[in-house]
Image (cartoon, grey):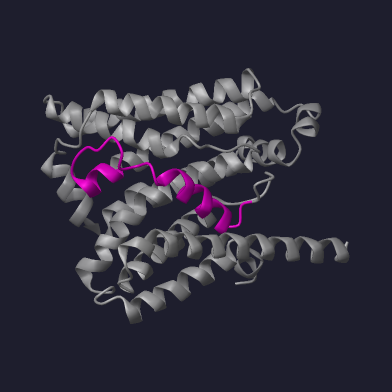
Amino acid sequence: MKKISKAKWLPSLILVIVFLIWNGIFTKGFFGAFSFRYFLNIFVPLACIAIGVTVTVICGGIDLSTGALVCVVNCTFVVLQEHGMNFVGAMILSLLISVAVGAVNGFFVAVVRINPLLVTYAMQTVCTGLALYILPIAGGKTDERFTNWYSSGTILGIPVSVIFFIVVPLIIWYVIKKTPMGYWLYATGKDEKKAFESGINTVVVQFFAYIFSGLMTGWAAVAFSGSIIGGDPNAGSSFTMNAVAATVVGGTALAGGEGDPIGGVLGAMFVELAIYAVLGAQVSTYVEELCNGLIVLLGVVGMMAYSLVKNRKRSVEM
């Protein structure tokens, strides 16, 4: 309990609890079996992306290519199945594409030393065009076995989507965190120059961070395909900024060196709960996006203010 009270993601946990209660009261049928399962299924992709983005931010970078990469992987995954490939093979090839995109990002950030904002924004543009080339208009259909497994499968009453696409990546992250790479990621994000001088290969560390982010984005895109049951070259565009917002709300410092992917998952849940709260309020569609943006903005500002106060308190104590 003491460890949780000191966690940087505690405010995001509180926000999640508040918005769960809010939706339970004001969103009709929110905690019904079907409705809540549907919410979890659409929350999973954003949570996966937030895990990957959090790792790049911890390492001192950022990844703005995630939304467009989701579109590329989603379209590839669907088109491969439309051409007769089973969903396992389509998943593997799609994930390899996402890893390749992460590797390209990592190469230009870590080796060529171009600003990660510029690199990943440029990659977002490339991926947007690639998604439209692969599937010009929305269409296609994922394998029914995969869709049913994703949308209704359970293990001990817990949705398969949550276990496979969130719990497994978090376990992988905590295994990495126990290795030297985990320490190197935080050290590089805290002070890249000092990390390099202490013998850490910061190029390899940054390269790894972007490959991990690419893999998590591909993982998210496969989950997203199971949620929308088809391919759409534009459907994933909103993920980019929502994932960054989730990362910040989850307590990860944009300056690098601090944070935890579990905070990113909680931040993603807050973002999706905020969207549900607006939908439940049945406001005009003209102001829906405005309300969503304002709620998320307040969450981000509140989290940054909390971090600032906490850091000042820590400085005074020292």
Q: Quadrant of residue 145?
A: top left
View extreme (top): residue: 112
View extreme (front): residue: 286
| Residue 240 within the magenta-colored segment of the rendering | yes
Residue range (magenta) = 223-252
How far from the left and from the top, in percent, is residue 159?
A: 27, 58
Q: Is residue 157 visible?
A: no
| Residue 303 within the magenta-colored segment of the rendering | no
| Viewer-closest of 306 and 129 | 129
Q: Residue at x 30, y 75 (%)?
A: 27
Q: Residue at x 69, y 25 (%)?
A: 201
Q: Give left or right: position of 46 versus 262.
A: left
Q: Give left or right: position of 282 versus 290.
A: left
Q: Quadrant of residue 6?
A: bottom right
Q: Residue at x 74, y 65 (%)?
A: 310
How far from the left and from the top, in percent, is residue 118?
A: 58, 29
How far from the left and from the top, in percent, is residue 286?
A: 34, 61
How far from the left and from the top, in percent, is residue 220?
A: 36, 43
Q: Quadrant of the N terminus?
A: bottom right
View extreme (bottom): residue: 25
Question: Looking at the picture, does residue 13 appear above or below residue 25?
Answer: above
Q: Quadrant of the C terminus?
A: bottom right
Question: Looking at the picture, does residue 197 appear above or below residue 269?
Answer: above
Q: Quadrant of residue 308?
A: bottom right
Q: Is residue 62 visible?
A: yes
Q: Give left or right: position of 315 versus 195.
A: right
